[in-house]
Amino acid sequence: MTTKQVDILNIGLIFTSLFLAFQIPFKLFLFSYAVLGPLHYLTEINWLNKKNYFVKNPKWICFLFALTVLICLPVLLTEVLKIDFFKGLTNLINNSSELRGISKWSANFLFIGIVSSISFVMFKETWKVILSILITTVVAYLLMTVPLYITIIGIFIPTIIHVFVFTAIFILFGAIKSKSKMGYLTVVLMFLSALIIAKANVNPRDFILSEATKQNFNSSTFSFVNISIAKFLGLVSENTNYSLISVVGVKIQIFIAFAYTYHYLNWFSKTSIIKWHQVNKKQFIIIAVIWALSVTLYYYNYRLGFIALLFLSMLHVFYEFPLNIVSMKGVFNELFNSKSRIKS
């Protein structure tokens, strides 16, 4: 497919994602996250590896891997301790100040990861990268008690910002490189879709959830993301009993379902442009097997699938940070150069 054809396809995918999000916002999100999500993680990580993760020195990817381990470790240990065989260790882990300390640093690990990725993209010299990491760590420590920082970095970066804002920047960067008007239109339509959702009239009674859907959605823990968005936008107060099946709750879920579904579909539409699908037989088998097992786990028990895939999901977020930086740098450079050309 040509770039123009891919852009046209993406416009169609935006409308499709938006239409389905309005019809079945909860079920669409659950399906996209469980079926499309794991395949996206696996194929993107494999593609990023072939691109040396867009960093000057690939060895620093080990640092992002370590941050992923640290951010996932408390959650995974908590889940493991729910298994009868390991319950004897519960008190030992609960009394571990180190584990509680790691958990409190979750937002900081994300902040350190994305800011340090700037140095991974820009610097070859090891000392510059280390200095950048040290400075970023100090800043993170100073900010770790600020509620707005925790919300934006700890909650929104790995979720809504990752799937919506970074996707828009990635598309815009591609449109700039290919000088595609249809690419620019795709970005406009993404934000227009968000506006349509915000202004739409919805009736919460049209979105009654079955017990299975409600249980699976709660298992995904995304109800907390919904609540955080509502409070961040000032749509509910701190003392309000938030309901997913309300005008605000449904609209936020429509947006989340749209953002996640289009994020995944956009990736799968780019095969002819970025060639992420070009893998050898061994890689194909590994990806296919892990994906099949992942979907099976989600089908058997959604929470089990969510926990089992947590590390892979978070790892692809961290590994994508350098690409996000490269995309933002490309967009800003183009805007700066355009202004310079206009002035001259």
Image: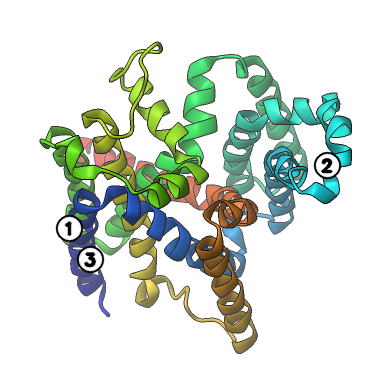
- Residue 87, label in figure: 2
Sequence-earlier tag: 2 or 3: 3
Q: Is residue 298 above or below residue 260?
A: below
Q: Nearer the viewer, residue 298 or 325?
A: 298
Mark-to-mark CA distance, 1 and 3: 13 Å
Q: Which residue has dot 3 on it? A: 7
Mark 3 is surrounded, within 10 Å at the Cα level, by few (under 14), some (14 to 19) or many (20 or more) other residues, namely many
Quarter of the N terminus within the rendering = bottom left
State left or right for residue 163 relative to residue 71: left
Mark 2 is surrounded, within 10 Å at the Cα level, by few (under 14), some (14 to 19) or many (20 or more) other residues, namely few
**Mark 1 in CB contact with mark 3 (< 8 angstroms):** no
Element at badge 3? Answer: helix
Mark-to-mark CA distance, 2 and 3: 53 Å
Element at badge 1? Answer: helix
Taking the view exactly as shown, the residue that stands out farthest to the front is 211
| Relative image position of residue 34 (x, y in whole percent) | 47, 60
**Mark 2 in CB contact with mark 1 (< 8 angstroms):** no
Sequence-earlier tag: 1 or 3: 3
State left or right for residue 271 relative to residue 303: left
Q: Is residue 170 visible?
A: no
Mark-to-mark CA distance, 2 and 1: 48 Å
Mark 1 is surrounded, within 10 Å at the Cα level, by few (under 14), some (14 to 19) or many (20 or more) other residues, namely some
**Mark 2 in CB contact with mark 3 (< 8 angstroms):** no
Q: Which residue has dot 1 on it? A: 15
Element at badge 2? Answer: helix
| Relative image position of residue 142 (x, y in whole percent) | 65, 15
Q: Nearer the viewer, residue 208 or 202?
A: 208
Sequence-earlier tag: 2 or 1: 1
Name the colouring of the figure: rainbow
